[in-house]
Each structure stands twice: as C-alpha cells, then as structure tokens.
Amino acid sequence: MSVPLLRSLLGSAVAALLVYGLPVHLAAQQTGSIEGRVTLDRLEQPLGSVQVSLPDLGIGTLTGPDGRFSLTNVPVGSHTIQAVRIGLTTVTETVTVVAGETVILNLAMQQRAVDLDAIVVTGQGSEIERRRLSTNIDVVSAEAIEASTATRLDQLLQTALPSVQVRLASGQPGATSVTRGRGPVSASRATTPVIYVDGVRVDNLNTQAELSLNTSGNRRQGTQTSAIADIPIENIERIEYVPGGAATTLFGSDAANGVIQIFTSRGTPGPARFTIESEFGMEEANKAYFHFPQTVDLLYRRGLRQQYRLSASGGSEEITWSFGGSIADREGFRIDNNASRNYQLRSGLNANLSPNVRYTGSFSFGYNEYERTRDGNAGGYAPLWLLEAGRIFALGWNNNLPELSPSEFNDLRAFVREAERLQDNRIQVSRFQTSQAMRWDARPDLSFNATLGLDHRTSNERGILTNEFLVHTRVWPDGTDDRGSISSYDRRFLGLTMEAGGQHRLDRGSLSLITNVGGQVFRNHDEQDARVALNVRDGSETVRGAGSTTADDFLLQVVNYGVYVQQNWGFFDRYFLDVGLRADGNTAFGEDVGLQIYPKVGFAYDLGREDFFRRTFSEDLVSGIRLRGNYGVAGNFPPPFARDRTVNFASYLGQQAAGFGQPGNPDLGPEKTTTVELGADLELLEGRLAFQFNWYDARTRDALFEVPSSPSTGELTQFRNVGEIANHGVELRVTGEVLRTDRVSARISGSFNTLNNEVVDAGGSPVFGISGYSAGTVQAVVEEGRPVGAIRGSRSTLNPDGTIAETQLLQYLGKPLPDQFGSLGLELTVGRSLRFNADADWQRGAQLHSFDRQFRYLYALPDPDLPPALLEQNPGPFRTNWLQLTNFFVEDTDYLIFRNLSARYTLPRDWVERWADGVELGLAIQNPFGWWTSSFNPETDHSGADSQGAATVGGFNYGSDPSPRTFLANVRVRF
Amino acid sequence: MSNGNVKSRLPYIALMAAVITAPGCDLLDPTEVVNPTVTEADFIQTRNAAASWARGVERQLAITVNQVVMGAEVASDNLFNNRTLFNRVFDIPEIEPTDVTVIDVQRAVHRLREMATRGLEEVVPADPNASPETVAQLHFARGYSSLLAGELFVSLPTEAGGTAEAPGVHLERAVTEFTQARSLSSDAEFRAAATLAIARAQYRAGNRAAAVAAASEVRGAAPTLIRWAEFDITDGPTNQMQFAIFDSGQDEFQPLPRLDFLFPKYFSRTAGAQSPVAILKGEEAFLILAEAAISQGNLTEARNVLVELLGIVAQRPTASINDTGQVRGRRGGTWIFPNASNILVAASAQDEPRAGLVLTRGEGPVTVPVVSGTSVSAEMLEAAGAEDELLELLYLMRQEIFVVEGRRMTDLGIRLPVALDEALTNPNIAEGGPDLVARIPPFIPLDYGLNRFTYSDGDTLAVIQHNMNRVIVQNRTSDVVAPFH
C-alpha cells in the first residue's frame, strides 16, 4: 500500500467513523430493586466503578464513588448477583427479590494479586480479557492512586510499577525524571514511555526543549523541566503500563519505550456524590544526602505545603459525569526559589445515546507555576557548587564549612540568603487536554469506536539576572549597571490524535476469535520562541527597552499514521494465540523509506483450566497458572526533519550568512526493537498469593545514533540507523496476603528485576557523549561493548607514596544502569478502619559520578574515602591532577529507599453518617529514610539530555537538590 | 424539541451531517508537515545565494579562528588556563587525538575548506550574480584553511575522507588558493592580504626566496595591512578568547608574566562590538624579512627591518581599559600571577629582571595595545650583537605581536595530531598510525613547564622557569622550529 493511499484511507476512515458512526436508534431503559454498597475488604472504604450485575438477566450497573448501587425492576425470584472490578476478586452471591420490595445487599471485595479476568485495553486496539494475552500489562487501580500521596504522574508511578524505575532527577519542582523499564532501547532518543490519556497521545517531553531556560551552565548539566510533571492526575480511574515489545506492537513506530495509558473517570449512575480533601504538610531536606550539614542550614528550610481537592460524580443510567479538581501550593524546602503552585481540573462524561451507541468525553486543564534555582554546572553563584563542592573559598570563605566561626557562618548565611533572594527564574505551564470518543455496538459481536482528542501545552520559562544579583555574587564589580539580562522562552505544543477501529468477536463452541482492525493518526506540533535581552535595567520584567534584544524560534512537526490488525484466537478457553501487524508511515522517515511493518505473535496457555492439572491441584491451592510467550517488534521514529539535507542561516554582522546545515539522510528510518518474552503467572490460595515471572530479550536494530561525521567532511552530526542495542533480563514479582486474623491482615508485594544492557554494535561510529561534561572530564557515552550511558573519564593508579603511577584517559568507569532493581510494599490492615502502607524501591550494581566530590578534591578539602598518601602528595590549595583521578569519584550506588509511609484511618460510619458517607484521616511521610552505599545521594542526578528528545541516562551527581522528605496530614470527606 | 424527537431524528441528523461534511474529508488528512529549515536544493535556486554563502564562509572563518586561538594559545607558553572551563591539559602540554579541542580545531579547519569548496563548486555555478570578488573570497578562505592545516597539524587530509598529507602539501595548496584569490580580486587591500598570506605560507614551508619576495611586496605596498576575523556579540560567534581573558571576570586565562602588559588585547570596543582577531597583519612581513636576513647572516639588514617594524607597531592604536575585574588568580584561580607594576619579571633565572611588563589593574584604567605591542626597543636591537641574541629578540617580538592570535604553538614546534574521530571514520587513516601522534618537540618542558614561574603574592620579582625564545634559538637547526634555519 502506498503512503498517499494509506493517508487517504486513514483520513476517510476516521472521518467516516466520526460522522457516520452515530446511533441509528435509541431504546428505553429498565429499573431494578436491589440496593447496596460495595466496600474494599472489611474496611469502610467504598469501592466505585464496580460492575454489579445479574448475569442471568443481562442487567447491571456500576457503583458510585460512595460504593452504592441500585438495580430496579428486577424480576421476582432468586438470582445470582455478581460484583466485578479490575484488580479485585469477583464476588458472587444469591439474592431473592420479592415483589414491591427493595433488597439491601452489601458486598465486600478483596484485592487480587493478579486478575486475569480484568479487561485491559493498552496495546490491543480494543478491550480484551487479560487472560487471553501473551503479554503482561500492569494496572494501577483507582484505590492505589487515591492512596498515593504523589502530586505528579512520575512520582505516582515510582512505586506503583514493580518492574520500572522512575527516578526524579532533582528536588526542584516540575523537574524531569528518568523512567527505566526494560533498559534503554535507544541511545539517541528519549527513554520515556509514550503517554496516552483516554486514547489521546500527550506531550511526554522529558528533556530540555530546544529553546529553554538555562540555569545550569550547559543545560544538559542541570535541572530541566518535564512535560510529564504537569499531566493532571485528578480524576484518574486507572493507569495501564506496557513495557514495549509485542505489547506495544500495535503502537508501531512510537512505542519501543513502552506505553502508559491513563483512563479517566466518567462517573457512575446515581445521585451526585462528592469528596473533598484537605492536605497539609511540610517538606525538609534530608541531611544525610549532604556532605556538609551546614549546607542544609544555609540553603534549606522547612517549607509548608497545602493541597485541596474536590471530586464529584453521578448521573443517570443514560448519562454519567465526573469531576475532579485540586489546588496545591508549596513553599518549597529551599529558602527561596523552590515554590510551586498547581491548579488542576478534569471532567468526564459518558452518555448512552442509544442502547448501542455511547459517547465519552473528558476535558482537563492544568496551570502550574514553578520556581527554579541555579544548579549543576551553572558556575558563578551556583549555591550547591559553592557550598558542597568547596568553591565558596573563591568568594573569601573557608570552604571547609565546619571550620567556620559563628560570625563567619553568619556572614556566609547573609550572603547566601541575599543571593537566593535576588534570583528570579520562573516557569509557567498551562495545559488543556480533551478526548472525545464514540462507540457503536453494531451487533452483539461487532463494535466500532472512534477517538479524537488533543493535548495543548503552553509554557513560558523566564530567567532574570539583575545587576544587583551579579554584583552581590561578585560576578561583576561594584557599580556594574549594564549586565542585567532577561531570557524568556515560550513553547506551544499541540498534539492531535485520531483513532478509529472495530472489534469482532466470534464464538463457535470451543473456538473464540477476537479480531481488531483500526487505524491511528497522531500529529505533534511544537513551536518555540526565545527572547533574550541584554543590558536590562534592574526592576524590569520585560525585554522592552533593553540595550539589545535577540529572538530565536524553532518549529517541529511530525505525523505518524498507521493501520493495524490483530487476532486473538482462543481454543477451549485455555489455549490462546495472539497475532498482530501494524503498518506505519511517518513524516520523519527519509524519502527512501516506505511503510514500516511491525509484526507480533504470541501464545498464552491457561494451564490451570486443564482437567489433568485440576485433578492434581485444587483451586484452593493453585488458583491459576498460566504460561505465555511472545515475539513482537516496536519502533521509535527518528527526530522530525533529521532526514533533510539543509542549509543553516545565521545573522552575521547584520547580514544573512548561509552555511552547512545537517548532511541529511534519505534512508532515515525508525529504530526497531524486537522483543522475545516468556512468562508465567501463578496464583495460589484462592488468589491471595501470586507470582509472576517474565524473561525478555530485546534487541534494537537500526538503532539511531547521532553519528559525528568524519571531521574531514566538515559536517557535524547526522542521525543514522547504524547501531544495535541489546537488553535482557528477568522480572519476578510476588504479591500476596501473608497474614490474616480476625483483626489484622497484611499484604506484601515485591519485585526483583535484572537488567543487562549493551551497545552491541556502534556501526563504526566513534564514541560519542550523550550526557555529562566534556570528553576531557567525565561523560556518559555510547560505546560499543558498553551499556548505554557508560561513564567515561580518566583512570589513574597510585604508587604507595600517593604519586600517580599511570593515568589512562577516556576509560570506562561505571554505568548508571543497575544490574538489579525492584520495589517492596507492605499494606497492613487493622480492624475495620486502620490501614498502613509502606513502599520502597531498591537497586544494585549501578554507579554514579560525583562532581561535587571531585571538586572538593580540587579545592583541597579533606576526603576520608581517598588514600591518605594521595592527599599528602597533593596538599593544595589546588590539586591540579584532579581530572586524572576521575575513577576515584565514581561510586557504587546500591540503595534501598522508602518512598512512602502512610497511615489512614476511616472514622466509624455511625460517627459521621448524619453528615457524611465517610471520613478518612491520613498521615504520611514521603522519602522518610533509606540506606545506600555511596558517599553522596545515590539517586538524584542530573539526567540531562543533550538536546530536545534525546536520551536521558543520568550518571552525574553535581550540585543537585535531592528530593525532600515530606510530612503530610490529610482529611478526606465523602458525602 | 423533546428528547424523544431528538432520538427519533438522530439517524437523519447523522445522515445529513454525513452528506454535508463528506466533501470535507480531505481536511482531516493531517499528514502534511513543513520543514522550517531551507533544504540545500532549495537554497541553491534562490537569488544571490553565492553572496549569502560567502558571508557564511566568513563567519566560519571566525569560528575556525576561535577554535584555533583557544587551543593553540593554551598549548603554548603564552597563557595558562587558571580555571576549569576550557582545555585543561594542553597546558601540560598533553595533546591526545581523543581530546575534544583537537577534534574541534580539526573539524573547524576542514569545515572552512569544505564550505568554501561547496561554494565554489555548487553555489557559485548556480548563481548568475556571483561576482569575481565573491569567488576570490572563497578561494582565500580555502587557502586560509590550508594554511592553518599546514601550520597547526602533524598531517591532515586535503579532502573529505582523504589520506593525511604532510604540512608542505597543505602549504603548497594554500599558496595556490591565495594566488588565485589575488588574481580574481581588484581590491588592492585584499590583494595585499593574499600576498601576505602567501608570504606566511612560504615562510612556514621554509621557502625563503618566495617568502621574502611576497613579504617585500607587502612591506612596500601595505606595511600596516590588517585582515580580521570579526565577531558578532548578538548572534555569534563571539570572541571566546575575549571571554577567557576579559569578559568572564573569573580570571580564566592568565598570561605569562612577561606578557602581562599586552592584556587584555581583546575587550568590547563598544557595548555591541567585540574585538576582532587579526588573521594577517603587516608586521608579519617584517618579521619574515628579518628572520630571512638573520638566517643569511645579514644582521644589519635584520636589525634595520626590525627597527622599521617597531615604527609600525608604534603606529598601532592603544586603548585605555578598565580591567579592575582582573585579579590575576586571586578569585580562586589555580595559580596567583603578578599583578602590580612594581613587579619585575625575569624571562628565566639566567635573565635580568625587567620592569614595565606587569600592569597594576586595580587602581584605574590601563593602556594596552589593541593590534600589536612589544617590549623590545631599538636599543635592545642595537645591543643584540650576536645572531642568537637578535634571533631571540625576533622571536620575542613574534610572541608579543601575535599574542592571543594562535600563532605561538607553531613557533614552538608543537603540532596537533589527526583526531581519533577521523581515523575511526576515514579508512585512509590508521587508528594507531603516526598521524595520530602530536608533535611535542623534546625541548618543550612538560608538567606545565611552559607556564611555570616563581612568584608569591607580595613578591616584587617573578622568575619564569623557561625562556622559550631562547630555547627556540638554541634549537633553531631542528626541523620543527625557525623554518629558515
């Protein structure tokens, strides 16, 4: 199929489904007479969105957020009633309906370790039962989201996904994070999964934008702002995550890093129900992360935070609605420049236009403000560099802070406070998202759906450097009045998604076949402007009237369009075969690259349903066992316009000057990751205990490397499909109830994941840096035979007298990727009202470089971890051989860090039932404590990317704020 | 209209919507994207493309000069990198093919050549408005690239992906290009610059007669000639050396104490104009002629030429600069440098201390040369009776006149290797071959020996460890320095 034909068909198909897919008839609804409430386990916690039905009669409803349901006009007699919800054990009871009466029925559901009957969507084209799939899908439930104290999506996922590491790169608000699942499949492109909200692809830029604020020297060497941080997390019903490979094949050229899909709530039938929540808290710096405790006294404080939430939902059988909104304000834990404010709201609507046509829509808006402080390699006044790295001596203070006299310390405190006060770096983000979807159940076995949506994110990053700041921080001498500057960067992102498809279900005795066919188009439009004004008078917040002003702009557009077909064959409801194919075109592909084909095939075998197995193992003991395996290909499309041979223009002495642009590559295509996966799911003791095992081998071929051209060509770099990257590992998870008495029950969860990553083939390209500093200092590089982001620098060996015996330049010193990692969780329920949660994550086998420490060596500070003879040989005041010794400053960063400790108490119903449906009180501590092997913070590192959308691997700890320790108290009232 | 009516009419509404909007289906084709950057194929078709390209080549010349100056000055005895920004190992000097500065300098030199070639071979032929002056400018730029290749590197490819050729090949090419540029231009000043460039290439190639012929022409026709690489503070490139010696305010690069009086050679002449860097100036013709005369034993002629050169230098402008931000390492630098005019400087332990080489900067503006300056006087030239003495003074004048212009490294005989990146991507260059080994002559002191001096804060005497001008003279018969000897 040609590309233009595919485009045309897609356009027409989407249009047809959007326009013609409207209902053809509407019918009346019936009512019932069973009422009740569904709660979680024995707790008072109500369960919303539980499907309560009478399967024999084909009628059902969903519980509201208060857990209540109502079925009317139910025929008289004895019926089986069933309560079903993802992640919970299905409850079945018998109910007898008497004419003219209402039966009151309360149901308690339990969490299920692995729910194979759950309906999932991500990567399948349409809804499908999890048991039929050959791949694994992680689901984060509404309860887990509600129980979390996280304020942003990546923080929420930090402990919710057992085989994914999410690392926040800095304690500054809105900063980027690194998501590592099954290792980096790319060495040049971002490792962040793509994110969908209600089927609409949203901006997931997790690196610096092309034009963005620089508070860190080279921008890759400090905090960058993430578009993930401002995705509203209000009103979410569940989140699905798939790690790549066959599970993401149907996403084609866009999904090798995996997919996160957020499903928002659309409400449930019933009267309007409200939940309001107030949360108060305090943030502080954890002194254990700092070399000098004095740094904490000088730069940090206990900052207050508050957050208010309101959510509501309700509706009739035909129309349901939902709303969630929040306001949050944080002072920040730095003495200044760390505050943030967020406003979020989201609404959802579900309307049955007829018995077989359903409209769903969701809208969200968020507004966020963040402050920024200078960090990383900013130079000049970069407070953590000055204090933690010893540079403060250059401004006249003893850099060994514990030796400062009280008066010297007070002087330094006054200096720092004023410098902090005079900084002015701000970020504002507004974001609007909507998803509009229509589903038409044409026949019981045939349905169609169409989704149209957009994500519009606008941001402004602005930094003001005043003369007063520059003079105070001694960058310029007293009297300077012409060095003030303003840098202001606007970015407008518009992402459009259109998707349409159909699903057909065929049941013929022992054979069941589900066929999904569809097409998807998404378009990203990313427009950026920069204004930089020099010689700005202090007090001015606008570039108007500056001594000189320069402007710059940047535009990036990409369209990806594809069609897919998938068939899931089931035999005897226990043998499943999954085959699928996606064909993709993309405007970023070179002109000699045609449609790209992504195939997948997999099997699932529900061994637990075999008679011979059941004859040996009872369902009480082995509730379920399933084996699965798959093969699948997913891709990452290249950077837009990287294919073109271009001419660059610059203004030079007031005139236009043309020069080499990029060399161009007509063969530029996607990098393709082929994954083979084998797995097993085991449920024991009626689903109370579950194990899951996955083995995967993922190989990225045609990996995109931004290859430096041969210097003699005079060209710079060009993206080429030359590399090969391998990732393999195992994932082992266990979840289950380990204790259950009349009053106490305990559930644990844990995961153990291994990761082996290697650049198998660099395609002849020289070693190139993707993060860090210069080749002569220390860099994260792409080098054949090493993991992506290998740390590279000088390695020296010492003689016994402390002199350097040998120095080798550009040596492999470690890697930021762990060999093993995982998470741990404990949930303890006491009585009917009290629940404790603890979540932690851990890693082994990763290393980080500490530039703070290396600078302390340069500036002649003591270092107990270095050989005493080395220090004696180099008394200072400058140890000029510092860059020869980089290997001494790369350390193992094994850790176990608790992310969350929380307790939640539900007030007895009879205390509150006159005025509320439920009241919960909560206490929580984020990042309470941990253990680690490095002499510095083992996880907060500048995960800076070289350019927009480039790979983020981390590896460097240098002048970065750690995540704060946060104490929270909240009250939640439902009525 | 009741709800029931809506429902019953829905099929018709859908049908009507479909009929009305079906022709607009094309509007839903979202696959069109527009690259905001001009493709090369489009550019060549635009009007006056050659003029725009030639300006781009001029800009690249400034970028190349930036890279050369920043690398070559640190690798010489002229400057010491007193902080952590910029290259930290060229001071040792430690020059590896993996060093980013080596890669950057090589890439910049080649980029200048390749851009000029693209202009001559593709842009100019497609542009009916391309003038002979534009073509001359492109030949000049290609010649300057070859000149730098011949002066700075052990060897380099003469074309993309080519074999590494010895400096002589590049210098020969430079002469060819400059000669062609000269023949195409009707601008007398440009022609004189091309002639001086020929003299410089012939000098480095050791072709005394040809160098003297060209230098004599310049001496007669344009003794005060200057050709600049100009910088653009607004849109770049900005003068990096100016940043390192003046703008940063952080004492990045510090001069050898005997050169202190020449700094800051670069500063912002107005709020919007940085200092340019001279790439050719008339002084060079005199220095070539004098060195040729010394090599032929004609010290009197050499002395006369150098005295005439002092007159040219004296004509060059000076500026009064507020350099109070410069504290010579006293704001956290690695070393402390002399910073007051009462401090005497000895060029080595064997040399007499001299006054007037260090300026006091904290008490008001200082007067510094902006093109050329020298501490050598006519009396010193007269007193230099022996060939060695006169040659040492000549090299001191070369050092002072060309300071922060990227020339000293070559005078010291140091040459950069071919970058490893080239070997990895160019099948004609072997990864472990001799092209990838820098040339650091055995008489160059290591372990920061080029920059070392004895001085403590408060002293009134600074003694430089090695007088490198004397070292050059002592080794003048070596193949790597003093091309006429």
Image (spheres, helix red, strand yellow):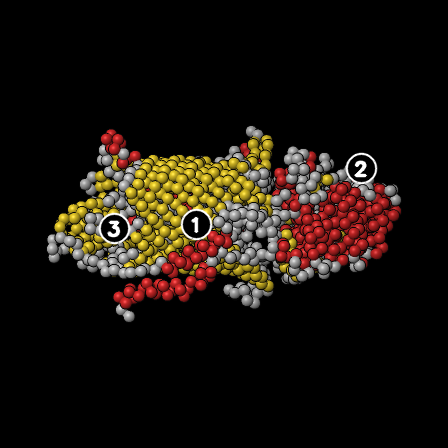
Q: Residues within 10 Å of mark 1 (few under 14, many from 20)?
A: many
- Determine contact: label 2, label 1, CB under 8 Å: no
In the image, B93 versus A293, the foreground residue is B93
Which mark is on residue B477?
Answer: 2
Residue plotted at (59% across, 34% down): A807
Looking at the picture, how far across and down is residue A658, in whole percent?
A: 65, 56
Element under disc 2: loop
Q: Residues within 10 Å of mark 3 (few under 14, many from 20)?
A: some
Residue A598 is left or right of residue B304, and the answer is left
Residue B48 is left or right of residue A525, and the answer is right
Q: Which residue is mark 1?
A: A563
- Residue placed farthest to the bottom in the image? B1
- Determine contact: label 3, label 1, CB under 8 Å: no
Q: Amino acid at mark 1?
A: Val
- The mark nearer the N terminus, 3 or 1, is 3
Residue A156 shows up from this direction: no
In the image, A862 versus A350, the foreground residue is A350
Among the 4 quarters of the image, the one containing residue B72: top right
Residue plotted at (31% across, 45% down): A506
Mark 2 and mark 1: span between their CA atoms? Answer: 75 Å
Residue plotted at (47% across, 45% down): A597
Residue A696 is left or right of residue A656, and the answer is left
Identify the subunit bearing mark 3.
Answer: A
- Determine contact: label 2, label 3, CB under 8 Å: no
Q: Which residue is mark 3?
A: A51
Looking at the picture, how far across and down is residue A856, in whole percent?
A: 52, 42
Q: Nearer the viewer, mark 2 or mark 3?
A: 3
